[in-house]
């Protein structure tokens, strides 16, 4: 860790950001640390208490927008996210929420709705690994057959079809990368040719994760 774990949360944040800016300086001009910036810093998870989470957030806010462009948080619940967005003590609201997309959190339906209402990007991770039953489900298999893509790729596109969801894909297999990257355009073409069937499939998929089609 690039900081002293016994230090205050504020000091830990400053030490961590200083280390990151040093590591991210230009290779062409290694003395340009003053010009380095971080596009997005994501807090890995809320800290032990809300007060500590807000303290870390306040420390990060001091770098926005010049040294850090955006702030985000991962493994976050709706009460914590709402506090970061609405508290009178915060000045920079999250741009990104990065959460597991799986049944244990009921697929974050209310949290994702809050993200849409507040222009926050929801990034899903553990999307494929945590959901083998959904990958085998009828709407996913139906889309895969109609578009002639893999069930995994079909599943990703349906998750993306939930509005304002970005899927984090961790595959190291080059052929799967190509398949997954090509799938959204293939599905887009399908939605234009068969919009009613696409809406039917998407509605069935939403039903499987407990999300109404009006959301």
Image: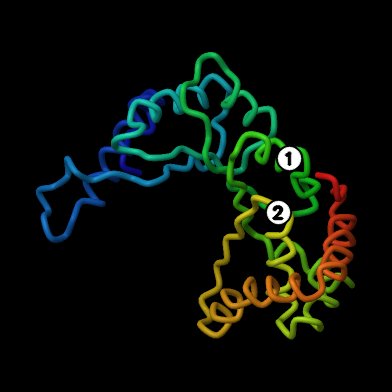
| 145 vs 97: above or below | below
Q: Which residue is mark 2?
A: 101
* SS under mark 1: helix
Q: Which mark is residue 185?
A: none
> Relative to residue 159, is residue 195 drawn left or right?
right
> Can you name the residue that lies furthest to the front here?
193
Q: In the image, residue 170 lies at what x, y percent? A: 55, 67
**In the image, residue 124 lies at what x, y percent?**
63, 54
Give me the C-alpha separation between circle 1 and circle 2. 14 Å
Q: Closer to the camera, 20 or 7? A: 20
**In screen coordinates, is 87 left or right of 207?**
left
Q: From the viewer's perspective, is 32 left or right of 76?
A: left
Where 86 falls versus 162 (above or below)? above
Q: Quadrant of the N terminus?
A: top left
Q: What colour-coding does the image apply?
A: rainbow
Residue at screen point 84% across, 56% down: 206
Identify the residue shown where x is 87% and y is 47%. 212
List x then y, in percent, for residue 134.
82, 66
Question: Mark 2, residues whose alpha carbon is within 10 Å: few (<14), some, or many (≥20)?
Answer: many
Ranked by sequence position, the earlier of labels 1 and 2 is 2
**Which residue is painted at 58% across and 46% down in the image?**
121
Q: For label 1, count other residues whose C-alpha is less than 10 Å away and answer few (under 14), some (14-19) or many (20+).
A: some
Tell me residue 130's x, y (percent).
72, 62
> What residue does disc 1 label?
113
Mark 1, mark 2: which one is toward the viewer?
1
- On screen, residue 122 versus residue 32, left or right, reads right
Label 2: state its secondary structure: loop
In this view, which residue lies farthest toward the top?
88
Q: Name the residue: 65% across, 60% down.
A: 126
């Amino acid at each position: 860790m690039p900081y002293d774990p016994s230090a205050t949360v504020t000091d830990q944040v400053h030490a961590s950001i200083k280390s990151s800016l040093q590591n991210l300086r230009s290779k062409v001009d290694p003395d340009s640390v003053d010009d380095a910036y971080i596009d997005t810093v994501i807090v890995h998870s809320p800290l032990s208490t809300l007060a500590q989470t807000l303290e870390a957030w306040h420390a990060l806010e001091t770098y926005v927008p010049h040294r850090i462009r955006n702030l985000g948080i991962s493994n976050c619940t709706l009460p914590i996210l709402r506090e970061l967005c609405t508290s009178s003590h915060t000045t920079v609201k999250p741009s990104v929420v990065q959460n597991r997309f799986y049944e244990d959190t009921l697929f974050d339906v209310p949290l994702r709705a809050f993200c849409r209402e507040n222009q926050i990007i929801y990034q899903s991770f553990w999307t494929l690994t945590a959901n083998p039953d959904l990958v085998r489900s009828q709407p996913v298999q139906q889309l895969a057959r109609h578009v002639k893509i893999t069930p995994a790729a079909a599943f990703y596109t349906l998750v993306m079809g939930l509005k304002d969801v970005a899927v984090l894909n961790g595959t190291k297999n080059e052929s799967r990368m190509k398949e997954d990257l090509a799938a959204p355009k293939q599905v887009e073409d399908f939605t234009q040719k068969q919009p009613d069937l696409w809406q039917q499939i998407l509605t069935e998929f939403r039903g499987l994760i407990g999300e109404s089609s009006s959301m």
